[in-house]
Image (spheres, coloured by chain):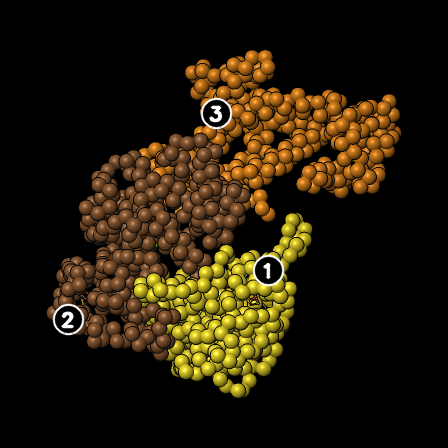
Amino acid sequence: MLIVISMVTFGIFFVVPQWAGSTPEALASRYVGRAATPETVHLVAERLGFNDPIVVQYGRFLKGIFVGAEYDYGAGVEQCPAPCLGYSFISGQPVWPDLLDRMPVTFSLAIGAALLWVVFGVSVGVLSALRRGSFFDRLSMGTALAGVSLPIFFTGMVSLVVFSYGLGWTPPGGAWTDLTENPAQWAYNLLLPWITLAFLFAATYARLTRAGMLETMGEDYIRTARAKGLREREVVVKHGLRAALTPILTLFGIDFGLLIGGAILTETTYTLPGLGQFAILAIRNQDLPQVMGVVLFAAGFVVVASFVVDLLYAVVDPRVRLS
Amino acid sequence: MSFLDVKDLRIHFPTDDGLVRAVDGLTFSLERGQTLGIVGESGSGKSVTSLGILGLHKGGRAKISGEIWLDGEELVGASAEAVRGLRGKKMAMIFQDPLSSMHPYYTVGHQIIEAYRIHHDVSKQVARKHAVDLLGRVGIPEPAKRVDSYPHEFSGGMRQRAMIAMALSCDPELLIADEPTTALDVTVQAQILDLMRDLQREFNSALIVITHDLGVVAELSDDILVMYGGKCIEYGKADDIFYQPEHPYTWGLLSSMPRLDRERTERLLPIKGSPPSLINVPPGCAFHPRCPYADRTDGRSSTEVPDLAPTERGHLVRCHMGRTERRTLWETEIKPVLETQ
Amino acid sequence: MSENEPLLSVQNLEKHFPVTKGLLKREVGAVKAVDGISFDVFKGETLGLVGESGCGKSTTGRLVTRLLEPTGGKVVFEGRDITHMGQGKLRPLRRDMQMIFQDPYSSLNPRHTVGAIVGAPFRIQGVKTENGTKKAVQDILEMVGLNPEHYNRYPHEFSGGQRQRIGIARTLALKPKLIIADEPVSALDVSIQAQVVNLLEDLQNELDLTYVVIAHDLSVVRHISDRVAVMYLGKIVEIADRKRLYTAPMHPYTNALLSAVPVPDPKARRDRDRIRLTGDVPSPLNPPPACRFHTRCWKAQEICKTVEPPLEELAGGHRVACHFPENAPVAATAEDATKA
Ligand SMILES: Nc1ncnc2c1ncn2[C@@H]1O[C@H](COP(=O)(O)OP(=O)(O)OP(=O)(O)O)[C@@H](O)[C@H]1O
Ligand SMILES: Nc1ncnc2c1ncn2[C@@H]1O[C@H](COP(=O)(O)OP(=O)(O)OP(=O)(O)O)[C@@H](O)[C@H]1O
Ligand code: SF4
Ligand code: SF4
Ligand SMILES: [Mg+2]
Ligand SMILES: [Mg+2]
């Protein structure tokens, strides 16, 4: 899976430009700066191996990721330890440490929001299902529909205007404190982004949970649980929710993996120094190695998340374990 | 008063298409150690009756009226919490499809332990031991090992045994089995019927068996109640129902079945038409559109609901025809045909 | 029984469904759903096929009608080997061989009218009828006891029994010679079952049909069949004419099956001496070796576990696969003659 992703990314960023008429020199020129003479560019292209067959280049690229790489610019050999995603065109810094730097921000955002949306989405979904047709059900499903259909920068902007600039309850965008420094401040700064991001997902989860609960609560085994004399709350939680959550778990894995995508918009809106913002900047600057780094990282994250979900799934549903 | 006394039970469901009178004025009683068989075709209200006794008929806007007395306690007017406390302990149920009736994510043992611990304040270890005992009692080999299996790892017959073990976990005094063997193969069905008979003797519980199979009721029941269109149309001792039935519908049921214990007939004698929808129950006697004798009652069959009245032998029949006329019909027309089968 | 050529002849028919595992679909075994069965069906007769769930009855039906591709053996219809005949050549044969399915609810397309459903075979096979398809369809509807005016109604407007009649009407459209009915009445209410059983019998007499009726209900099978084959785990263990099979069954499994049927007679239960099998049918993925019934058979000996008993003719037309059959043939024949 990861191999496929790395091939595709490699293809998009290295192979396609070459097919599209980009010469090795044009590629190399990005590494040496604008003022270089054609001779140096040619030399660098040669050294960086842009003239080699694609397979060899790909092999070198993979090797960089797993064992590190050495770049010889002619002006000295540069060590790039694994995982080597190359160097930024702009700053000349290796990409990986930069990514690492920004990870805590994105993870803070993602984990907090995920917690919020799972708790809220699922409980609203369950309550809606149990009180189908009630005022609560209609209100929450109406809100959920809005949540699903409103774009995140819209809800983000509105909430910023209302809560930060208007009411002054939350800090304006751009505030970031490390968790280790001051946990309270950390949470306070992230509150609004969490809620905004969670709102979008919670809406989907509420709708899904509601549908799932409506289905499972009609199952024969729910009737059996009641016939045993189990209290209704336990029937709902231990028997109904347990089964209804399985599909939600799958979705959660995928969503959490894809969260980087959601984070881009949120981080941009609230100007948080996370991976999303990093990606936007990288794209804006046409900083190829950085863009590739983020993409590979995000893709890897999706794969790992869905792998974890598969494992969890087997824990949750014993029927999966057999086959 | 009997151990279980059901009086004029009505369970109606308002739906978009109209009022479904799933159970419409049902009265019966049952003692400990006795078995009541409820027979009837699909949609006659058998399952709703049993769910109603357990207080599980809910399904939104169900309307229930009448009385259900279980061991001196009235259940229809009782609080939901009071009825819940009786479920599983005083009264338990076995369902038709053991696979869908057990939670797929929990082990069989877990589900039995759960049932036991709802009503008994014991540790998990004690409950587990009890579960293993029960599984052994219902004939599951190596119960100590199988207690940790999931329902899908059991065969159909073993699942139904596990369901029975679960229902019996708190020694219920009333056990209701809704089509307990319909989903099983004949050889396994025979095993389960034997098991239920033995266990009932052992536990001395009152048993209600619901089925559409006259063979199954004959195997188990002391009393039989025949339902049609949400109403009881004939109710009495098993022998009366099988050897001296007086309702045309019961006659129809008996003569439309091919029977292995008789010589083969050239032709089966079906009942014409099909069972009524409970939204549009025919006026008068619900059976009249299908009854070959409806024209013998001066038109009352299609206008007036007949009462459930005792026959000469003392069992109850709901039909406008006179007692003597019915007996004569049975003796001269129906019985001879059935006997030659 | 007729001495002439059988209408349908099945020889050593086999269907193994591969069981695969993992991404690469590695074959790890096979479900031996049907494992070498042979039988003949003669014109005008009804052969009943009984057995417990999963023994391969439906698979046999699908193999014979070529809805499934056999993995071994031969299917001969009217003297022609159709085992591996291509779909093109098979098409005209489909007119002669039809199948009725168990579930009258799901086997009819809810969006098509009764007329369209029953008339479909005409259109598919491109058959021209004298007075138009509509007239032909209405005639068939009448034949199966439905009102011809129901032509434009939809399946959901009918009861289960009526839907099964529609299903039967559809198979009759092209005047087939052989009908394979897979559990035709098991989804129906008792009082309706009899209607459909009678209808099948009437149609057989009227149209000179030949039936293979698949069912798990032994009393229905006895009522409707002339000959009966008993299956266990993909094998035929006993095949005989009706009277023989029901009065003097030879295979222990047949005896157990018959003994297990609950009898609608409260007095009989008190004094009936019954054979009780223990356990369930083993999985067809790993059937027991030699005699497949030996794990549940009370007569099993060492030889049953090592040598597979062949399906042998022990009395006139009565074939059994058992080393120690019940109802010794000589006695059985004599008893049978007096009972008839
Ligand atoms: N919650 C409900 N709302 C509306 N109608 C219902 C509800 N539950 C049951 N019914 C209707 O009540 C009638 C009786 O149903 P019931 O399940 O008791 O039949 P049954 O005799 O058990 O039939 P079967 O043999 O098919 O199980 C049916 O017509 C059914 O559609
Ligand atoms: N397409 C398939 N792939 C794999 N296994 C199959 C397939 N179809 C049937 N089987 C298996 O083959 C065996 C025989 O199935 P079949 O449907 O013929 O049984 P049956 O005798 O008709 O049973 P029933 O009475 O339950 O209808 C079963 O174990 C079944 O699981
Ligand atoms: S009341 Fe009339 S219609 Fe009903 S069973 Fe009696 S004779 Fe038949
Ligand atoms: S061969 Fe042996 S095991 Fe098989 S049925 Fe006959 S006696 Fe039983
Ligand atoms: Mg029911
Ligand atoms: Mg089948």
Q: The orange chain is which one?
A: A
Which percent across, then down, holds residue C17?
60, 60
Residue A314 occupies which quadrant of the picture? top right
Q: Quadrant of residue A7?
A: top right
Which residue, as the protein is rendered here, is positioned at the far left?
B298
2 or 3: mark nearer the eye: 2
Using the image as rendered, state which of residue B185 and residue A95 is in the foreground: B185
Judge from the rendering whether residue B274 lies leftward or rightward of residue A212; answer left or right. Answer: left
Mark 3 residue type? Ile
User: Which residue does the image show at 48% across and 25% down from the upper left?
Assistant: A195
- Residue named by callout 2: B325
For mark 2, name the chain. B
Q: In this view, does C273 lie above or below C179?
A: above
Ligand 3: give its quadrant. bottom left
Chain rendered brown: B
Structural crowding at the residue carrying mark 1, measured as other residues with C-alpha within 10 Å and reported as few (<14), some (14–19) or many (≥20)? some
* Residue C15 seen in the current view: no
Residue pictured at 33% horizontal, 57% vertical:
B220
Q: Position of residue C114 (x, y in %)?
A: 38, 68
How far apart, in angstroms, are the residues tagged by discs 1 and 3?
59 Å
Give me the residue at 47% from left, 68% from top.
Answer: C255
Q: Is mark 3 on a helix, strand or loop?
A: helix
Mark 3 chain: A
Q: The yellow chain is which one?
A: C
| Residue beneath the point at 29% across and 59% down | B40
Residue that badge 1 annotates:
C287
Q: Nearer the viewer, residue B82 or C85?
A: B82
Q: Which label sits on residue C114?
A: none
Asked which secondary structure carries label 2, the reply is: helix
| Circle on res. A195 | 3
